[in-house]
Image: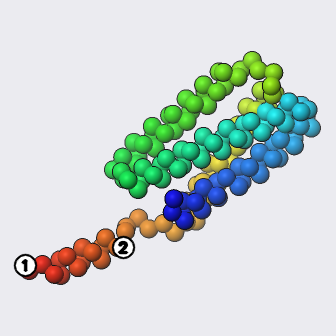
Amino acid sequence: MQSNDARLLLHAVVPTLAAGAIAAAVSGAVAGATGAIGAVVGTVLVVLVMGAGLVVLQQTAKKLPQLFQMMGLLLYTVQILFVAVFLIAFKDTTLFDTKAFAFTLLAATLVWIAAQTRGHMKAKILYVDPDSADAEKAETAGSPT
């Protein structure tokens, strides 16, 4: 993972965990221990799903840049399906408060997306590889025409 990839991941994880901590405190005050557990589970689910998605997307961009857009769409579909399966599996659970879980899941997802967007906008990521342009110039200058 390159330094700018790690930076983008860090810029998304930290605000999401902060929002999750706030949600856990509020849920704990409103719904008790099960509310706090629901908020923590929702935050962890968002960080794992969205973090794994970001890592997979960055690896795809490096190895197969022509598939980047298609992989992004597929990745978001898989993320939504994974969360839906999790919601269906735990819809009648008593381990945690499902309302606190759902609201935290929504809030943490929105915070992740906003933080990731901000991180991309502030990052100075080159969309042209300067090394490849130098190599191309050297090849053209050395070859007789």
CB-based contact (under 8 Å), mark 1 and mark 2:
no
Determine which residue is flagged by label 1. Answer: 145
Q: Position of residue 44 (x, y in %)?
A: 70, 41
Element at badge 1?
A: loop
Determine which residue is flagged by label 2. Answer: 130
Q: Amino acid at mark 2?
A: Pro
Q: Position of residue 66 (x, y in %)?
A: 33, 50
Report the side of 61 relative to 86 (left or right): left
- Residue at figure coordinates x 31%, y 70% from the top left: 132
- Residue at figure coordinates x 72%, y 54% from the top left: 15
First in sequence, mark 1 or 2: give its number: 2
The vertical placement of 40 against 136, above or below, is above
Report the side of 66 relative to 106 (left or right): left
Res 71 → quadrant: top left
Tag 2: Cα neighbours inside 10 Å, few (<14), some, or many (≥20)? few
The vertical placement of 121 against 100, above or below, is below
